[in-house]
Amino acid sequence: MGPTSVGRVLTVPVPMLSGMRSLSGPRRALLAAAACVAVVAGAAIGLPRLVAVNRALPAEPVPFALPAPTGPGRIGSLDLHLVDHDRPDPWAPDGGPREVVATLWYPALPDDDAPPVPYLAPRVASFLDQSWSEIGVEPGAVAFAEAVTHAHNRAPVADAAPRAVLLYSPGGGNPRAFGTTLVEDLVSHGYVVLAVDSTYQAPVELPDGLTFPARGVDMKQALAERVHDLRFALDQLGVIRDGGNPDAARRALPAGIGALLDLDRVGLFGHSMGGFAAAETMLADRRVDVGANLDGSMTPEYSADPAARLDRPFLLLSAGTDGDRAAPHTHLGAPDLARYWDRMTGWKREVHLPDGEHMSLSDLQSVLPAIAAGLPLDTDAVRTAIGTVDPAASLQVQRRYLRALFDQHLRGTPQPVLDAVPADLSVAELVR
């Protein structure tokens, strides 16, 4: 089967990567032309070839494991298929209503007898397995389908104590699973997190098939639809809080899960396009109290209102340089971030990983080095994706600063780390 521009299929085609760019320049804006081409994990990274040529491949698929969460709490998760009957999908072949797939992560009781939830949906795992061949990783070389999370499916809720709620939006072209490491850590410290896929902006598994990114999409419209998706998802959390079940298949929800949702304390964070969407959603929806952008460009012409002011707390967590300009990708080095920074009139901070890169702010910061332990990955290609920063130190920075952001602004607990980088996080710097 050839490349699919728009649509839902039950088989998994291998899309061509023609027209893909490297991660230099404004690639963070809507990561690697999120909805313009059939984006896959390898293409989104922007690597010409991930496996070094003339190197022997392993006989068995290379496994990888996600880093364990740092908090004491156990984790449950459940998938939701949400249908917005009031909004036609602009890219659906049949012109039907907008469909959104999300995973709700929540504090749960121990359930050690239950198997852990797979990291990737089955068709997404198959899709990545096939599509990475475009960058030199042959099908079957990586055990995508065997990777698991630290959550148990629909596990009993830990208690009825209301928890602050966070939403996560992934980078353009990336499945929501690529934010699992940060999501799980936050849940292990007591938060509830809803990770939201935006259909036709990434490979997304719906009940009747896998959808791919639409071609030729206007980037402003793509961002606007993602904002609508996040606001709609927040609406559906309200349905759950009030005792309803918005899942299209009416799959049973764990008893008491609605009582966990404190929708008077809401945060939103995202990577790349998802980070830009976090700020845009806050401008459109005052239910969101605090947000964070993980290395996403904030191009003014894609904004719904380039003159709007963001008056609530916001964190920029950035990495590496701003492409060919070789300036740091910060509000001091990137003109688009500088313009948006000036529009932030509330509390704001920026934390930068100078030796990181764009995909450092996703699970690939941990996954690529794990795969490299068993697969001959090209050093230069990996550096293009995740830089030279120590992966464990980079992840520690991300976890600490995100948790500090939400602890301070949703739990009212002052966090000194937001005002000065401690010695154990020296791979990062505050940008003032």
Image: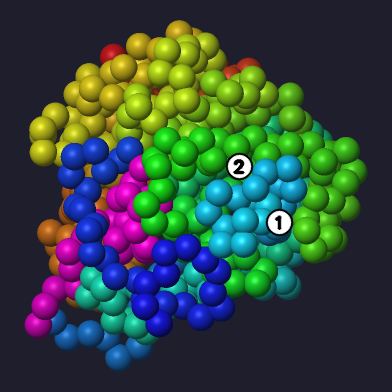
Task: Residue 1: name its quadrant.
Answer: bottom left
Estimate how packed mark 1 is, as few (under 14), some (14 to 19) or many (20 or more) residues with alpha carbons within 10 Å: many
Q: Which quadrant, please, contains the C terminus?
A: top left
In the picture provided, is 337 more to the left or to the right than 240? left
Please state which amino acid type lies under the numbered disc 2.
Asp
* Secondary element at image label 2: helix
Report the Cα–Cα distance between label 2 and label 1.
Answer: 13 Å
Residue at the (19%, 24%) spot, across then down? 333
Name the residue located 68 percent from the left edge and 52 percent from the top edge: 97
Neighbour tally class for label 2: few under 14, some 14-19, many 20 plus, Cα within 10 Å: many
Residue 276, horizontal then vertical, whole percent: 43, 33
Magenta region: which residues?
30-54
Kindly indicate the quadrant of the structure image that contains residue 248. Answer: bottom right
Q: Which residue is mark 1?
A: 80
- Against 137, residue 246 (above or below) is above
Where in the figure is residue 217, as x and y percent of width and height?
A: 41, 48
- Quadrant housing residue 416: top left
Helix, strand or loop under label 1: strand
